[in-house]
Image: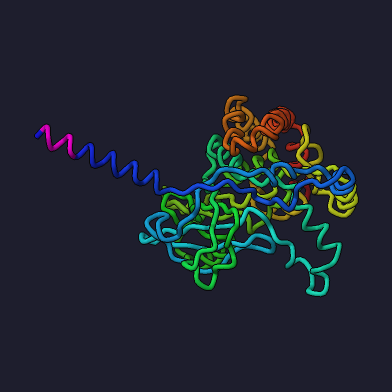
Amino acid sequence: MRYANVLFITAFILLLVQTVVAQEFVLVAAGKQYKSKSRFQRIVKGKNYRAEWATPVKMPVFNIKKEQGGLKIIKMGGGMQTKSLRLEDSNGYKWVLRTVDKDVSNLFPKWMRSSPVKAMTQDMISAAHPYAALVVSALSDAVGVPTPHPKLVFVRDDPAFGEYRNVVANKVCFFEERSPTHNRKSDDLEELVIRMRKDTGRVYALMQKELLKVRLLDMLVADWDRHKNQYRFGIKDSAGKRWVYPVPVDHDQAFFYSEGLFAGVAKLFAPFLKGFRESPGNLKQLNYKARKFDRTWLSDLSARDWDESIRELQARLSDSVIDASVRRLPPEVYALSGQRIATILKSRRNALHAPAMRYYAFISHK
């Protein structure tokens, strides 16, 4: 019996070693094209996060045939800038593979896609931190917000992707669960509204304080690109009601920062590009894209609810929690900006109450 146990343990260790060895890693940059080339470029276009984009990072190679026991492609997803693929494993669970770098081509008509304006807009992607989603995921866990847990991967030019081969070939991507809910199912806002209209025999209730928690975190990390398509919704049944709770996704503009002349001009027309600074400042500007969403879906909350939620968020995000969350950055990138990001997060946390309450007054004003 003892001999059999030894054999079993030995076989298990060999299998484990083989699995570890089989995992291939590469050292690759998320966007070496954003590397700063001159002092003039830094002045005009901004220092931004060019070093973070251009620094090679160690990450695993994604294998669609092996990941999660093998995945099949359902369809192409993504918005105007992000390219993504919807995937499904053998258990029917949904996953997403989305590019870290963005492509702004779809923002322009075909005749402008070779223009200097398009090139300058593409370069502004460097003002977004390429790995911010890793930090926001950890912060979300700390405050009790269900959220995807992105895994940084490199996708080779793999024939197994079939007709979608060129979508992610030779790109750095995030691989994450699509619905990190209790039952691994979620709806986008339009799907949720349709479900509620059809299910007339059930009472649905949005957990608005949970949504406020999500939105306060958006404000903390200075993510200006929050709108109805940046949230999915899970449902749990309790006490005769269907409770709807939010699941934020795609925090690609968290920590956005640029001091270049081009960004300065852009802010005249898009004041929500305020930047990740020590003070939250005017949240009415930062939340320009989300103001209608907030007015609609946070309408039942009082000033007291906001006050309590802000203080709870501040309490949960202690200095040690923030430090640990920022450590989720790749070590090569943490060395460049990790301490600065942690310092600014702590400052914004400490100063969040007053500007957040002013924003409450703004969206609650009739």
89 left or right, relative to 50: left
Q: In which quarter of the image is residue 80?
A: bottom right
169 left or right, relative to 24: right
Q: Is residue 231 visible?
A: yes
Name the spot of residue 266 as percent of width and height, x first: 87, 52
The prevailing secondary structure element of the residues shown in magenta is helix
In the image, residue 32 above or below residue 352: below
In the image, residue 352 above or below residue 203: above
Q: In which quarter of the image is residue 323?
A: top right
104 left or right, relative to 188: right
State the quadrant of the N terminus: top left
223 left or right, relative to 136: right
Kindly identify the residue that appears in the image at 49 percent across and 53 percent down: 177
What scheme was used to colour the molecule?
Answer: rainbow
In the image, residue 264 above or below residue 114: above
Name the spot of residue 141 as percent of width and height, x first: 53, 38
* Residue 363 or residue 160, whichever sits in front: 160
Kindly identify the residue that appears in the image at 12 percent across and 34 percent down: 3
Name the spot of residue 147 as percent of width and height, x first: 53, 46
Highlighted range, magenta: 2-7
* Residue 223 or residue 87, whichever sits in front: 87
Q: Does the magenta stretch include residue 341?
A: no
In the image, residue 50 above or below residue 157: above
Q: Does the magenta stretch include residue 3?
A: yes
* Residue 200 or residue 131, whichever sits in front: 131
